[in-house]
Amino acid sequence: MRAPLYRWLALLLIAVPAAAQRGVGAGVHVDLDGTAPVVRVSRVLDDPQLEDLMKHGFPVRLDFRLELWRTGGVFNELERVQSWQMLVQYDPDPYQKVYRVVRHNGRQTESFGAVASLDSVDALLTRPYRVSLPPAHPGAKYYYNVVLEVESLDVNDLSEMERWLNGDVRPAVQGKGNPLSALFNGVGRLLARVLGGTKRNYEATSPIFTAAPR
């Protein structure tokens, strides 16, 4: 059964003042464990707009890009890059009402199973994530820069979302119902286009360090 039109209009009105509703203290952080980068996230989902979108069937994707920069000379040099994704999806099944969280780094997919609340998802994202991105030049000066883009998936992302669902992550994100049903009716498609401004961008830089000798 389709949701009444007034519910979609109410959701649209909620979604407009996005910038004013971001969580206080939200961001991404990159610290050093020795010289290895450790990435964690704080309160990026603490946003009424994103929560409402997830409750109405719009998954949220977190795209991470970690860059290794070597200092010196006229310009700093980008030496290596590593990317990974996380997907947060609400399961609307009345007997579930949980969030499904997965992380995919291009080589393997990690499922965190059913998470009871959005606060618990935030706590999970706060856990340090150690990344293997070692420097190539011992004794040189380096720093890490991490960029995070948080985006509610819209109709233009359907093909990519289908690749997720048809791949290794399907059992972890699909749940018992069809969480993407809102995207497949006319009102959902129109709403998804209007909600194209639901991206959040965060960035952080580590302290400069000296690469250890091999």
Image (tube, helix red, strand yellow):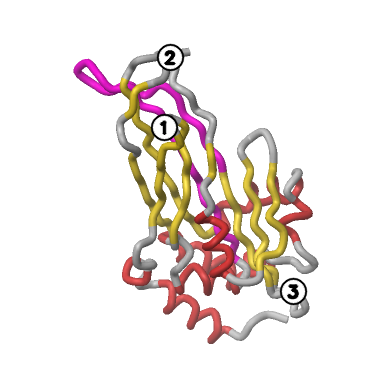
Magenta range: 58-84
Specify whether 20 is left or right of 1: left
Q: Which of 155 and 46 is in front in this view?
A: 46
**Number of the label disc, if any, that sits on residue 67:** 1
**Number of the label disc, if any, that sits on residue 96:** 3
Callout 3 secondary element: loop
Residue 62 part of the magenta-drawn span: yes
Mark earlier in primary sequence (2, 1): 1
Main secondary structure along the magenta-highlighted residues:
strand
Q: Which amino acid type is shown beneath numbered disc 1?
A: Glu
- Cα–Cα span, label 2 and label 3: 51 Å
Residue 164 part of the magenta-drawn span: no
Residue at x 32% of width, y 70% of height: 20
- Cα–Cα span, label 3 and label 1: 38 Å
Judge depth for marks 2 and 1 and give the one in front.
Answer: 2
Q: Which of 185 and 28 is in front in this view?
A: 28
Percent x, y of residue 25: 35, 62
Residue for badge 2: 213
